[in-house]
Image: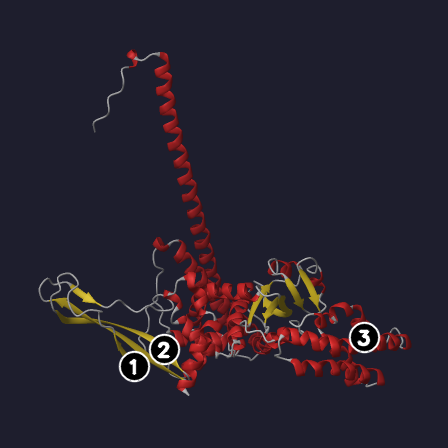
Amino acid sequence: MDRAPLPDLDTLDRDALVALLLAHQEELTAQQNELRSLQTELDSHRQLVSEQAEELDARSQRIEHMKLMIDKLRQMMFGKKSEKVILKLEQLEFELEEEETTQAVIEAVLDRVSPARGAKPRHERKPLPEHLDREVINHIPGRDCCPDCGAQLRKFGEDISEQLEYVPDSFKVIRHVRPKFSCTVCDRVVEASAPSRPIERGLAGPALLAHVIVSKFSDHLPLYRQSEIYSRQGVDISRSTLAGWVGGASDLLSPLVDAIQKHALAGRKLHADDTPMPVLAPGNGKTKTGRLWTYVRDDRPAGEDTAPAVWFAYSEDRKGEHPRQHLKNFAGALQADAYAGFHHLYGNHIYEAACWAHARRKFHEIHVIHASPTTTEALARIGALYAIEEEIRGKPADLRWSIRQSRAKPLLDELRTWMEKALSRLSSKSETAGAIRYALSRWRALARYTEDGLLEIDNSAAERALRAVALGRKNFLFVGSDCGGERAAAMYSLIGSAKLNGLDPELYLRTVLAQIADHPVSKIDDLLPWNLARFLQIHTSEAA
C-alpha cells in the first residue's frame, strides 16, 4: 500500500512542526473518542443481550424443575389421594403457566433488541389433525405478468402452510396456498408474499388467540384447563404452547394498552378503586397479596360523547406511592373511596369527590342485622338523593348541576343537620354512630358532586370494573407471579374497555390481532375499541 510522503522535517521551522504535531494529535484524539463511544455502545448492547439471555436460561431451568415436580405430584395423586398434593399441584400449574408466558414475552422483546442472535431451537411440531375442516385460501401474485420483463407467467408449483384457527365451539385449519409462477421468457419466479401472522411463525390464528385470552382473563379458565378442553375436541395443544401464545400476544398488544392508559387519564374526572390479588411468592408455594388498581373514564352519564375506557395497573403491595405514580400526569376530580393512600394526592391538581355508595353501605350493613329508626331514616334520606340522580342520568352537565343545586343541595343540608342531631343522641361506641361519623368527616367531598354536573354521586363505575377481578379470584385463587399480575392488568384493560364500548371482547381482540402485527405504532389509536366500535357493531348485526 502506497503511503503519502511525509514532509521533509528538516525543511520545517519550529512553528510548522508544532502545527503538524497538534494536527496529528487532534486527529488521533478524535479517533480514540469515536472508538470509546462505539465500544461503550457495543458493551451496553452486549450487556443487555447477556442479561436477557441469562434470565431466559434461569427461567428455562425453573420451568424444567416445575415440570418435574408436577410429574412427581401427579404420580403421588395416583397413589394415596391427598388434598394437600392436589392444592400443591394446582399452585405449580399456575406458577408454571406464568413462567412460560413470561418467558415468551422476554423472547419477543429479545428478538426485537437482537434479531441476529439466532433462532431458538424448536421442537418438532405435530401435524394438525386430519379430521379438522380445512379452509383453503389462495394467495395469487398481484400481477399476471413477469415484473422484470413483462412476459407471461406459468405455474410450476406452490408453497403451502397451515394455521390453526378457532370458530366458536370448534376448530378449523386455514390452508394458505401460494402458487409459484415462473416467467416463460426469463425464468423469473413470482409468488405472493406470505400472509403475516399475529405471532411470527406461530400456529395460532387471531380468532384462536383471542379465544384463549378471553377464556383466561374474562371467563377465568386457566391455560391447563383450556388444554384439557381442547384435547377433548381432538386437538392437542399443550399448556406451554398456550402460554407462549399468551406471552407473544401480550407483547404485541402492549402499545394498545399504553394508548388506553393515555386516554383514560386524559379526562378531568376519574373513578379509582383497588382490590387485592393473591400472588404466588417465588419458591415457597405460599401466596402474598398484590394489588390491582382500576381507573375508569366514563362521562356518558353527564351526556358526554367521549369514549369510555378503563385502565388497570398491578402493584406488589398497597402503598400510596403506586397511585401517586399512576396519576402523576392527571389533573381533575378523583372519585374514590376513603382509602388513605389517595389522600396525599389531593391538592393543586387533583381534588376529591367521595362516594355516597360507601357511606350508604355502612348504614345498610347495620340495618340488615339490626334495623333501627335511625338506620331507616338514613337510608330513606340517601335514597332520595339517588332518586334525583336516576332522573338526570345522561342529561347534559349544566342541567345536572342546575337540578342538583335546586333539589339535591337542600336535601344534603337537611341530611347533615339530621346526622349531627342523631349523633348527639347515640352512644359514641355504637356502629350507627360510626357510620354517621364516616359521612360527616367526609362531608365536603361527599357534597362536591352537587357543584359539578360532570361528577357522579358515587364510585360505582370503578366498582363495576373490578367485578371481573372478583369473579376471577373465585376460579384462579391466585396468579402465578408479579409478571402474571401485570399481564392480567393489561388484558383486563383491553377486555374492560371493549365491554364499556358495547363490544364483544373476543370479537374485538380477534379483529385487532388480525391487524396489529402489520399496523404502524404511530397509528395505534386506530385499533382502540371506540375507533373500531362502529365497524364491529355493523359486522355483528350483519352476521346475526
Q: Residue 134: which numbered mark, if any?
A: 1
Per the model, the C-alpha gap separating discs 3 and 1 is 70 Å
Decide which of tag 3 and tag 2 comes sooner along the chain.
2
Q: Residue 413: which numbered mark, if any?
A: 3
Which residue in the structure is indicated by mark 2? 165
Q: Nearer the viewer, residue 398 or 184?
A: 398
- Horizontal side of 82 relative to 449 (left or right) equals left
Q: Quadrant of residue 168?
A: bottom left
Question: Where is residue 138 shown, x and y percent of the image?
Answer: 24, 76
Q: Secondary structure at mark 1?
A: strand
Amino acid at circle 3: Asp
Label 3 packing within 10 angstroms: few (<14), some (14-19), many (20+): few
Q: Quadrant of residue 120?
A: bottom left
Q: Secondary structure at mark 2?
A: strand
Q: Secondary structure at mark 3?
A: helix
Amino acid at circle 1: Arg
Q: Does residue 268 appear in this view?
A: yes
What residue is shown at x 77% (from left), y 85% (from top)?
A: 368
Decide which of tag 1 and tag 2 comes sooner along the chain.
1
Q: How is the image coloured?
A: secondary structure
- Horizontal side of 212 relative to 488 (left or right) equals left
Decide which of tag 3 and tag 1 comes sooner along the chain.
1
Question: Where is residue 135 shown, x and y percent of the image?
Answer: 29, 81
Q: Nearer the viewer, residue 118 or 415?
A: 415
